[in-house]
Amino acid sequence: MQSPESVNNVVDITPVQISRKGADRLAGGHPWIFRSDVVSTGDAAAGEIVHVLDFRGRFLGQAHYSTSSQIALRMLSRTPERVDIGARIAAAQRYRVKAVGDATAYRLVHAEADFLPALVIDRYADCFVVQALNQGMDRAMPQIVEALQTQFSPRAIVARNDAAVRSLEQLPREVKVVHGELEGAVAVSMNGLRMEADLVHGQKTGVFLDQRENYLAAARYSTGRALDCFTCTGGFALHLARTCERVEAVDSSAHALATSRKNADANGLTNIDFREADVFDLLSSYSSGRRSYDTIVLDPPAFAKSRNQIDAAMRGYKDINLRALRLLGPGGILVTCSCSHHVSEAMLLEIVAEASLDAGRTLRVIERRTQAQDHPILLTVPETHYLKCVILQVT
């Protein structure tokens, strides 16, 4: 049997051996190997590309190795050939050309779903935001930046490495411009609307790109008086304003609301009222005051960021959907979302069903949706499917 070194004609790649359980996980199509399934690591360094061997010493592929995370290995390739990050970024762009329409802002690389695990790249017109979420991609940042420069000649590249998961990798949490110059927000277009994206201080990487297609779907059914909860930069509110008489956009962040107002002004939308408030408290007060709406959008932040938060998240989702349903009458539209990976679509539907019974409302499902197509989902990697969006009508 050939050694991994002779297979790859490279003598300096460290072999890492995994257990039968780990090998079975790879065989099932999942690219992660947990630390408990690593048998030996040799002298593998943080972020190094290593050769993965099974419990019998057979070559299984190449992976980034982490010295600190419970996800010790993230597979890069099942072959011994050199991993070309630039070629994978180019392949990701070719897919986006087909998948993205009427938008100058989109996700260019969606981590595992684009075979670049723990790497996220979002494009905002002629600027890019990069998130390196593990030691391997952090170590590969020079190659990533070089590939973006070569392929796109961007005005600026921002390393938005402030995600909490970097702490698990013992990496610093920081935001910095790693190429070019960037002053102020970046103007982008989405679904015929102009929006500003704050690539340095905004939530996520500037704009909620994963809801782009859901914005249009929500607007297709919305009518009358609308309430957009957790509006952030105004994605749903701006789209609803084109089909509704009046939209009330609510968020607890003054900074986010300021951006929303700018976006509304830039598009000449004068039928949006912005309110800074806690959504849970506001819905309760509106219910007590017997307010009513024709359309309500619920797009909260993730309530469950880990498995041990699922029970609390389920209570939170039920509570907020119950309060919203009490404000909707016959024919009313509810657009309810969850970006918690640990809360499945089936769980979300069950929660909303329970809330509808408690509120005395009968609902029918109009559409069941997910994240935009520039956030592709790998069938054998459930972690790549995180966003659920359900559009319902009160009958």
Image (cartoon, helix red, strand yellow):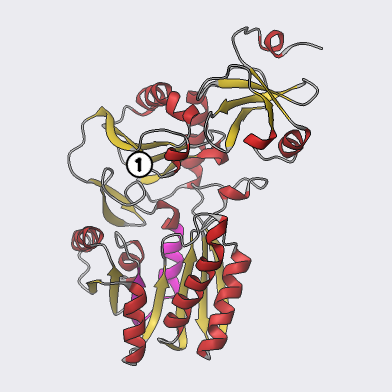
The quadrant where residue 279 appears: bottom left
Residue situated in front as seen by the camera: 40 or 190: 40
Q: Position of residue 57 (x, y in %)?
A: 77, 20
Q: Which residue is mark 1?
A: 162
Q: Which corner quadrant holds the C terminus?
A: bottom right
Residue situated in front as seen by the camera: 350 or 92: 350
Q: Is residue 34 visible in the rendered structure shown here?
A: no
Q: Residue at x 51, y 73 (%)?
A: 315
Q: Amino acid at mark 1?
A: Asp
Assess disc 1: are there few (<14), some (14-19) or many (≥20) residues with their C-alpha within 10 Å of its C-alpha: some
Q: Measured along the vertical axis of the image, is residue 278 above or below residue 374? A: below
Q: Position of residue 178 (x, y in %)?
A: 29, 28
Q: Residue at x 22, y 74 (%)?
A: 273
The quadrant where residue 242 appears: bottom left
Magenta stretch bounds: 213-229
Q: Residue at x 51, y 75 (%)?
A: 318
The quadrant where residue 301 appears: bottom left
Residue 215 counted in the magenta span: yes
Q: Is residue 5 visible in the rendered structure shown here?
A: yes
Q: Measured along the vertical axis of the image, is residue 135 above or below residue 274? A: above
Is 312 placed left or right of 382 in the picture?
A: left
Helix, strand or loop status at disc 1: loop
Is 121 placed left or right of 315 in the picture?
A: left
Q: Position of residue 64 (x, y in %)?
A: 56, 27
Is 212 placed left or right of 262 in the picture?
A: right
Q: Position of residue 52 (x, y in %)?
A: 67, 24
Tally the marks: 1
Q: Residue at x 22, y 68 (%)?
A: 269
Residue 224 counted in the magenta span: yes
